[in-house]
Amino acid sequence: MTDMNTKERDRPRAGIASARPSRSAVPDLTENEIQRAVFDHIRTRGVAGLVALHPKNGGIHQRGRRAGINSGLGVRKGASDILAFHASRFYALELKRAGERVKEGDDQDKFIKEMIAAGGKAAWAAGLDAALHQLEAWQLLKGNTA
């Protein structure tokens, strides 16, 4: 959320928390590289009892003939990149490259809002640092990266 103007930054976001990337964020990491690094942190720093996964829901699974078949099987457009469960709570974190964001009204935005409405914690994070800070804020990772 570093590229937001002041007016947009101050506007309420319907309860959606998004972690701000630090100045040391590496801007050229792809979303897949960010996701791999986040899961490395989850494996090494995750709190006891944490279950986390990536739903293989997007991209090719929602195109052409597969879209109808997979939709019937529960594949969901916009599902967050990381779904986590801990202490009877549900978390969803959408990952974006540094400088990118979830667009208001798109499938990812709708999923995040639905998760919050259902009582879960959901957010999006731009860059690796922001993703790790969000997981730390939810107390899903031991220690901190700051």
Image (cartoon, grey):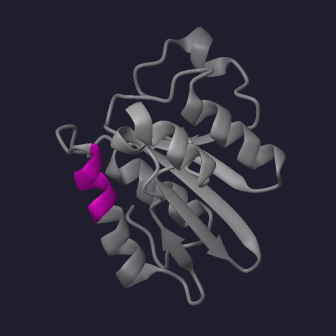
Image position of 115 (left or right of 44)? right
Q: Residue at x 36, y 83 (%)?
A: 44
Residue 119, how many percent across, how many down? 82, 55
**In the image, residue 63 above or below residue 52:** above
Q: Position of residue 3 (x, y in %)?
A: 40, 20
Quadrant in the rendering for residue 73:
bottom right
Magenta region, main secondary structure: helix
Above-or-below relation of 65 to 69: above
The answer to which of 130 and 74 lies nearer the viewer is 74
Q: Residue furthest left?
A: 28
> Which residue in the rendered view is the most extreme toward the bottom?
48
Image quadrant where residue 10 sits:
top right
Residue range highlighted in magenta: 31-36
Does the magenta portion include 52? no
Which residue is at the front of the view, 123 or 61?
61
The reply to whether residue 22 is visible in this rendering is no
Q: As rendered, which of 10 and 115 lies closer to the eye?
A: 115
Residue 9: x and y in percent read: 59, 20
Residue at position x 53%, y 55% in the image? 134
